[in-house]
């Protein structure tokens, strides 16, 4: 789990503590559907329960909005609500809970409390309540009954049990409904954001290492599957399908095909003893149910509903017991909502949060339409937000990532996009990022890939050295090399670096037409090396060289002109 906006990993048990060790009251954890928020809650409660009593906190009350929705319109005391939702608490008498809550209602300092309590509210995005965060009821009497929504909103605001800890989980789209003044810390569950994390999952899931590598190799060939595998739940579904298919497997290429395989596997698992004739009838019945489920999902998602209830199923002619339970259907739906105007949305001026940027990056990767131009500096978000948009380069033609303080993990993503099959990138601007030699190594390795079709590359002011020129030369000499323009402006390459770069320029595989070397500390010696490299390559395409802000000397320009190059002073 990471602290939102900072990219800093934190331990689950430390999420309520700031850097100085002080306890924060309310923590909001965000993450996409299926990314592992509820699993995180279960792990926390399980770890807490295994440690035994006493410990901090002394009591943990895990509440689910999916369950709380069913109590809408009803009134409870806080103790009654807990007994109603959490069966395991019923051995604690209501009077005892009221006594504890009365003490908490008047106390303010968590550290001085003789009895510490924590409430978990899982799935805030699923709530059907009309929370009024801007309406104050003042401190509440814990012995009185209130509507469920009043109890919940006042727990969050701190007007009910101000000294209790509150942990809320939500998808990003709903998290903004909670006013920032009521959230002391925000964290995010990121899932498998790196390819090596996804690979590790399958290596641990399958005992046959060769099979695991083959599966992941097939996943990397599909941008939709690779992107969806950021969700641990999706990885599990994919692994289940592979196991059901046996040794002679071929990964489904579409999500529809994948989920059909998954559902059929679940049906057969629920009904293992059926004969062939009964199995065929069951499959036919399942097909009819699938059509009804599709109708249900279509109408409900149009309304913006992501949770379906029994009355919704009945409206589409579905019987919960007959059609779903007996067939073994999983009733979780995955929603893919890719907007055609996503480029305009990115540049609309609307302030984007970091989690929203992560979601947009995933949407862009899964879109059937390749994005023409991704310019991160035009996105109204934080630096962390821009960095989270970097994976979208896998599905765009032009990527402008200048001045985004990219780290090695981001450059790995860009390199992966350059070498993927297919690779859509034609223009890449990494100006103003401190790549150094290690970053250039990653980019140049990708440039050598037969899948790479990059034509324009800007590495302006990227802290490149002489060694960077050597690996760039190797990339220019690779077959095929599609680079037509290379900008190395404001890198301290010097003559020694240019001499190494020329090994690539004189290669017959080099297709460079424009080379920008402004402010690279080049003298007449470096110019001579460049002219010589062009002269030694009869098929050279290089025509334009920018040597402004250098020290080429009096005869350097004539030397370059004689080699057929146009120069810029």
Image (cartoon, rainbow, N blue to C red):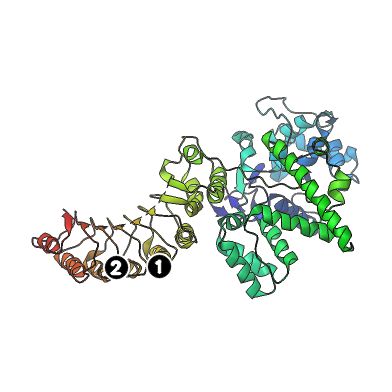
Compared to residue 379, the image places residue 264 above or below, namely below
Q: Nearest the camera: 130 or 43?
A: 130
Q: Check disc 2: other Cα within 10 Å, few if <14, some if 14-19, many if 20+.
A: some
Secondary structure state at the residue bearing disc 1: loop
Residue in the picture at 63% in, 67% down: 215
Q: Position of residue 490 (x, y in %)?
A: 27, 56
Left or right of 195 on screen, residue 208: right
Q: Is residue 492 visible?
A: yes
Q: Residue 477: which numbered mark, if any?
A: none
Foreground of the two, 236 or 278:
278
Q: Nearer the viewer, mark 2 or mark 1?
A: 1
Tell me which corner region of the image, top left, top right, bottom left or bottom right, holds residue 263. Answer: bottom right
**356 lies left or right of 94:** left
Q: Which residue is mark 1?
A: 448
Residue 182 position in % (x across, y down): 64, 35
State the residue position of label 2. 466
Position in image of residue 386 (x %, y %): 47, 47
Q: Earlier in the sequence, mark 2 or mark 1?
A: 1
Residue appearing at x 38%, y 54% in the figure: 428
Q: Quadrant of residue 74?
A: top right
């Amino acid at each position: 789990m990471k602290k939102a906006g900072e990219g800093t990993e934190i331990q689950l048990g430390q999420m309520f503590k700031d850097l100085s060790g002080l306890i924060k009251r309310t923590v909001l954890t965000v993450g996409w559907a299926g990314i592992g928020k509820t699993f995180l809650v279960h792990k926390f409660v399980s770890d807490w329960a295994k440690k035994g009593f006493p410990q901090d906190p002394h009591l943990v009350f895990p509440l689910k909005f999916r369950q709380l929705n069913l109590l809408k319109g009803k009134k409870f005391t806080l103790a009654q609500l807990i007994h109603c939702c959490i069966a395991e608490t019923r051995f604690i008498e209501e009077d005892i809970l009221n006594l504890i809550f009365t003490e908490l209602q008047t106390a303010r300092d968590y550290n001085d409390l003789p009895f510490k309590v924590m409430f978990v509210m899982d799935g805030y995005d699923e709530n059907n309540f009309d929370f009024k965060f801007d309406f104050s009821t003042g401190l509440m009497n814990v012995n009185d009954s209130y509507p469920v929504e009043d109890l919940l909103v006042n727990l969050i605001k701190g007007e009910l049990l101000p000294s209790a800890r509150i942990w809320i989980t939500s998808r990003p789209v709903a998290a903004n409904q909670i006013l920032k003044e009521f959230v002391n810390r925000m964290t995010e569950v990121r899932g498998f954001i790196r390819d090596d994390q996804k690979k590790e999952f399958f290596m641990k899931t399958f005992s046959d290492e060769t099979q695991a590598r083959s599966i992941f190799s097939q996943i990397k060939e599909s941008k939709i599957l690779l992107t969806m595998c950021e969700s641990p739940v999706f990885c599990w579904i994919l692994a289940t399908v592979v196991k059901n298919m046996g040794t002679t497997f071929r990964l489904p290429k579409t999500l529809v095909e994948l989920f059909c395989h998954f559902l059929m596997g679940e049906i057969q698992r629920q009904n293992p003893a059926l004969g062939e004739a009964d199995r065929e009838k069951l499959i036919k019945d399942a097909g009819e149910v699938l059509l009804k489920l599709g109708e249900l999902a279509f109408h409900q998602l149009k309304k913006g509903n992501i949770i379906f209830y029994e009355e919704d199923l009945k409206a589409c002619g579905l019987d919960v017991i007959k059609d779903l339970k007996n067939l073994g259907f999983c009733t979780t739906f995955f929603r893919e909502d890719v907007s055609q105007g996503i480029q305009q949305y990115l540049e609309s001026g609307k302030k984007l949060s970091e989690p929203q940027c992560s979601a947009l990056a995933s949407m862009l990767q899964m879109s059937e339409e390749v994005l023409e131009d991704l310019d991160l500096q035009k996105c109204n978000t934080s630096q962390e937000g821009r960095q989270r948009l970097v994976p979208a380069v896998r599905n765009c033609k032009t990527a402008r990532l200048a001045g985004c303080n990219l780290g090695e993990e981001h450059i790995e993503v860009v390199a992966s996009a350059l070498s993927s099959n297919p690779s859509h990138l034609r223009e890449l601007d990494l100006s103003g990022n401190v790549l150094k030699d290690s970053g250039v190594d990653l980019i140049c390795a990708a440039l050598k890939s037969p899948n790479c079709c990059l034509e324009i590359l800007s590495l302006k002011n990227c802290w490149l050295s002489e060694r960077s020129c050597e690996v760039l030369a190797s990339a220019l000499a690779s077959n095929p090399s599609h680079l037509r323009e290379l900008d190395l402006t404001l890198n301290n390459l010097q003559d020694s670096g240019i001499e190494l770069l020329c090994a690539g320029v004189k290669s017959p595989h080099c297709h460079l037409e424009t080379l920008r070397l402004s402010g690279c500390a080049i003298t007449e010696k470096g110019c001579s090396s460049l002219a010589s490299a062009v002269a030694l390559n009869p098929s050279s395409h290089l025509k334009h060289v920018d040597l402004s802000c250098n020290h080429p000397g009096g005869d350097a320009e004539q030397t370059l002109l004689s080699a057929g190059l146009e120069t810029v002073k």
